[in-house]
Amino acid sequence: MTTTTVVLACILMSVLLYLESKEIPKGILPVKTVISLLFVVTALIQPRPLPAYFLWLLPGLICCLGGDVFLALPQKRMFFFGLVSFLAGHLFYIICFFYTSPPSGLVLLGALPVAVAGSWIFLRLKPYLGDMIIPVFVYIIVITIMVCGAFSILLKPELALPGRLLALFGALSFYVSDLFVARDHFVKRSPINRILGLPLYFGGQFLLAFSIGYL
């Protein structure tokens, strides 16, 4: 079943990238929604060696599914709703990661480069944000904490290494994909942002979903 969801997601990703490159909005929403449903299904069918990890991660994935739907809608205000949905998803991920592996001094050390990167990104985006400056600022803080949470998971040796790596690279992929979303929405709209960002985003979500079964 897991192999089936991954293969289907890869096929649909090819379709989605084609639709994005040709800018065919009517096809984007259903295809994107199905891929998002697949990473939720992938999480549901994983073994659950850490039930609490699953119970906190799953609502985060569902919130991100909602965010995907909002971002695929054409209305301008939908971007704000999408931002809120992803923000809620990151909050669930943060709880999931830090509940599973409470932060240590090493996590704070690892947070430094992520915080520097987040500050640089915000300063680059600031001239383009307008009335979205506060929501984007809050979002950058939250996603930075989320990545730190994934780093905390990596530093917990009691957990299986494959699961720790899946969680970390899933979080990092999500983080980088958001750079392309921000560039596309605020700086310069271009198919290349989606062609690069979408595989990173969905790949990151699937890695997080798989981490449930490998910790």
Image (cartoon, helix red, strand yellow):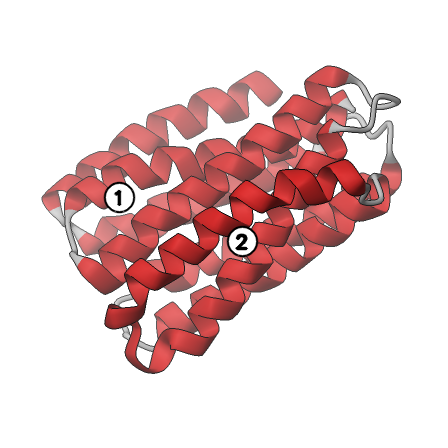
| Disc 2 element | helix
In what quadrant of the picture does the C terminus appear?
top right
Quadrant of the rendered structure where residue 148 is?
top right
The reply to whether discs 1 and 2 touch (Cβ–Cβ < 8 Å) is no
Q: From the image, tell me which residue sits under label 1.
A: 194
Circle 2 crowding by C-alpha within 10 Å: few under 14, some 14–19, many from 20: many
**Is residue 42 in sight in this rendering?**
no
* Residue depicted at 75% across the width and 25% down the height: 213
* Residue depicted at 72% across the width and 28% down the height: 154
Picture coordinates of residue 140, whole percent (x, y)? 49, 59
Quadrant of the rendered structure where residue 184 is?
bottom left
Picture coordinates of residue 141, whole percent (x, y)? 55, 61
* Residue depicted at 53% across the width and 42% down the height: 113
Query: As shown in the figure, which amino acid type bears the numbered disc 2?
Result: Cys
| Disc 1 element | helix
State left or right for residue 171 relative to residue 182.
right
Q: Which of marks 1 and 2 is nearer the N terminus?
A: 2
**Is residue 10 in sight in this rendering?**
yes
Which of the pair 15/54 is nearer the observer?
54
Q: From the image, tell me which residue sits under label 2.
A: 64
Circle 1 crowding by C-alpha within 10 Å: few under 14, some 14–19, many from 20: many
Inter-mark Cα distance, 1 to 2: 17 Å
Which of the pair 8/18 is nearer the observer?
18
Number of numbered callouts drawn: 2
Query: As shown in the figure, which amino acid type bears the numbered disc 1?
Result: Arg
Task: Spot the residue most to the left.
Answer: 22
- Above or below — where is 30 with respect to 131? above
Quadrant of the rendered structure where residue 133 is?
bottom left
* Residue depicted at 45% across the width and 57% down the height: 119
Q: Residue 73 carries which label?
A: none
In what quadrant of the picture does the N terminus appear?
top right
